Amino acid sequence: MKHLINELFEKSVPIRWKSIQKEWGSTGWHGEFEINGKKYEIEIVRQIGDRNAPWEIEFYLNRNGVQDISITKTGDANIVFGTVIKGIQQWMQETNPDIFTIGAAEPKRQRVYSMMLDKLLGKEWTIKNYGSTFLATKETEDLEEIYSYDPFENL
């Protein structure tokens, strides 16, 4: 099974990265890549000035300027997820994050994300599944307050 998971995510294409600052006060990374004529984007952003706020990771298909998180039936899932994993790895090497979230709306995608996070993260990470959102926290001595962070406690 592990061999199949590795094979599923091993193919990727290059990502063009740039830094971004959103008008609502978050900053981060924006990446673009193309597979078979389809344009995909990754955004990894965090609120400025709040070191306890999680980084938020999103990726989507850009359909003529419209963000479409439904990438099913595009025929390129293995390469898309392989590229997203490589992109997240690049971001993690540069920023050394302690906490991030990534969302998955469909149950099938939630299973894929669970496998993807298991492949991507080491044993020092804890992953909590809140249905359509995964919260990943890394064990660190100086950020104990992160472990009590629940982004959904007020919902």
Image (cartoon, rainbow, N blue to C red):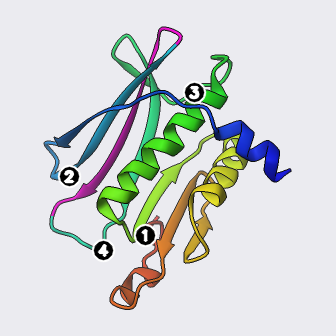
Residue 52 got which mark?
Answer: 4
Of pointers 2 and 1, the one earlier in the residue sequence? 2
* Badge 3 density bin: few <14, some 14–19, many ≥20, Cα 10 Å: some
The type of residue carrying mark 1 is Asn
The type of residue carrying mark 3 is Ser
Q: Residue under circle 1?
A: 154
Rounded to the nearest angstrom, the CA distance separating label 1 from label 4 is: 16 Å
Residue at (53, 10) in percent of width and height: 36
| Residue 84 on the magenta span | no
Q: Taking 118 as reference, is 148 above or below it?
A: below
Residue at (30, 61) in percent of width and height: 95
Residue situated in front as seen by the camera: 100 or 36: 36
Rounded to the nearest angstrom, the CA distance separating label 2 from label 4 is: 13 Å
Of pointers 3 and 4, the one earlier in the residue sequence? 4
- Which residues lie in the magenta part? 36-48
Of pointers 3 and 2, the one earlier in the residue sequence? 2
The type of residue carrying mark 4 is Asn
Q: Taking 70 as reference, is 109 above or below it?
A: below
Of pointers 1 and 4, the one earlier in the residue sequence? 4
Q: Mark 3 or mark 1: which is in front?
A: 3
Rounded to the nearest angstrom, the CA distance separating label 3 from label 4 is: 30 Å
| Left or right, residue 85 beside residue 42 | right
Of pointers 3 and 1, the one earlier in the residue sequence? 3
Q: Secondary structure at mark 3?
A: loop
Residue at (46, 30) in percent of width and height: 60
Q: Residue under circle 2?
A: 26
Rounded to the nearest angstrom, the CA distance separating label 2 from label 1 is: 21 Å
Q: Residue under circle 3?
A: 70
Residue at (38, 31) in percent of width and height: 15
Residue 68: x %, y % from top left: 48, 24
| Residue 47 on the magenta span | yes
* Badge 4 density bin: few <14, some 14–19, many ≥20, Cα 10 Å: some
